[in-house]
Image (cartoon, rainbow, N blue to C red):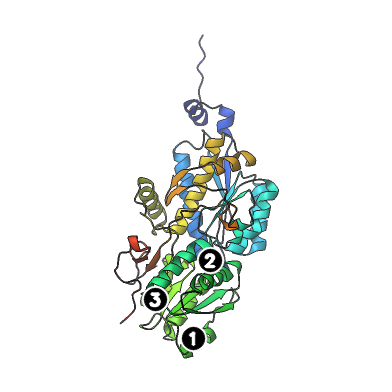
Amino acid sequence: MTGIIKLSATALVAVALGVSAAQAQETIKIGGIAPLSPPGGVQTGESLRDGMRVAVEELNAAGGIDGREVELVVEDTSGVPEKGVAAFERLASSENVVAVTGSAHSAVCSAVGPVAEKYDIPFIAGECWSDDVTAAQIPEVFRITVANSLVYSVAADWVKEAGFKNIAIISENSDWGFGIIDVFTSNLKDTGANVTSFTAERTVSDFTPQLLQLKRADPQPDLIVAGFTGSNLLLMLRQAYDLGVAPSPQTAIFAAGSDVLEPEFWNVMGDAGTYVIGNPAGLPGKPDTELSRSFSKAYEEEFSRPANAVAMEGYDGVMVIAEAIKAAGSTEGPALQEALRNLRWSGTRGEIYFPQTTDPAWQYQQWPEVPIFVIQYTKPNQTPSEAAILWPKPQATVDETVLKPE
């Protein structure tokens, strides 16, 4: 009598993909870290996490990675380095993830780099811009967003083109905040522009003293750079408007934090958000590829909000890890790191790769072609994709380099 063998769904997937049933049953765990509670930038953290979710759902719908289901485990950092280290430790030691992506907040990214080195697993840093994150040259750390020296040199080019002469920077007291001041100052030192700067703790929520000082200044600044993250960035922008400082016919305001890309920006600002300037490290639909379109559609359908650069980073971070696993044929840390160093993968924002350049130090394992834009809202409730593109010039959608209220 011939026996009938019934295969489970997992086994059927294994047969179809040419792997053993035992291998197919082993779940691949990918870790994520993000600020999901104050004082961190919660909206930024949620966008990172939700972008990761779309990637994992897409991978599993296609049969996982080499027939193995993918599980995403996300830990909250609150944007605090100590909590970030504890979160990474849990993911590496208790959850046994094969790699970690995400973060936001440069201080967290810098703090968890040595933990990635300790466990010898890759960390794909997203939405943390301090040069120090990659300048530490930790072999396990790769970055898929910009470094300060990359993004603000581009922003400084826009400042030069727009002809601003009196620039005031109000930055948080962090590696990222100090980096904003350093890069703007060094890039504008030979232009004749006057750059002044103020710093404050990340927890400060009342910027009235600094803003009133700027309002009384002679000459008044023609550009204010707001170098804060989280809800306090939005509070600064709202206070600048309510005090009649900016945006105004005399003074433009440039928000360096990614929170201006989220719908919550409009909840706080209302019509006052019009003419605020931002600099996303990517825009949905640019480049206009099938992947960029399909991701944006899936994200908006699932979360009822438009995708943005941060969500794209979350997605790309998981997918870069998945591509490395496929290329390595392994989930072991050293093999994944080697695969990442040889990776070229077309993500939602362009072809991602990680050069081994060590001079300048921040370029080490830094994706050098992150798309960088300077955008400006021209109507209430616009998405970043609907805003005017001011820079780079070849992609500008308006003739002016900056728009100001009448």
Under mark 3, the amino acid is Gly
Tag of residue 144:
none
Q: Which mark is residue 163?
A: 3
Q: Nearer the viewer, residue 127 or 14?
A: 127
Relative to 67, is 252 on the left or the right?
left
Residue toward you, 71 or 230: 230
Does residue 266 sit above or below 140 in this rendering?
A: below
* Element on which disc 1 rests: helix
Q: Residue furthest front?
A: 190
Instruction: Choose mark 3 or mark 1, whichever is in front.
Output: 3
Marks 3 and 1, how far apart in space?
Answer: 19 Å
| Amino acid beneath label 1 | Leu
Tell me if residue 203 comes above or below residue 331 in the rendering: below
Query: Which residue is identified by label 2?
Result: 41
Q: Residue at x 49, y 45 (%)?
A: 319
Residue 240 shows in the view: yes
**Rendered view: 208 above or below 258:** below
Q: Nearer the viewer, mark 2 or mark 3?
A: 3
Proximity of marks 2 and 3: CB atoms separated by less than 8 Å: no
Label 1 near label 2: C-beta < 8 Å? no
Type of amino acid under label 2: Gly
Q: Residue at x 54, y 82 (%)?
A: 206
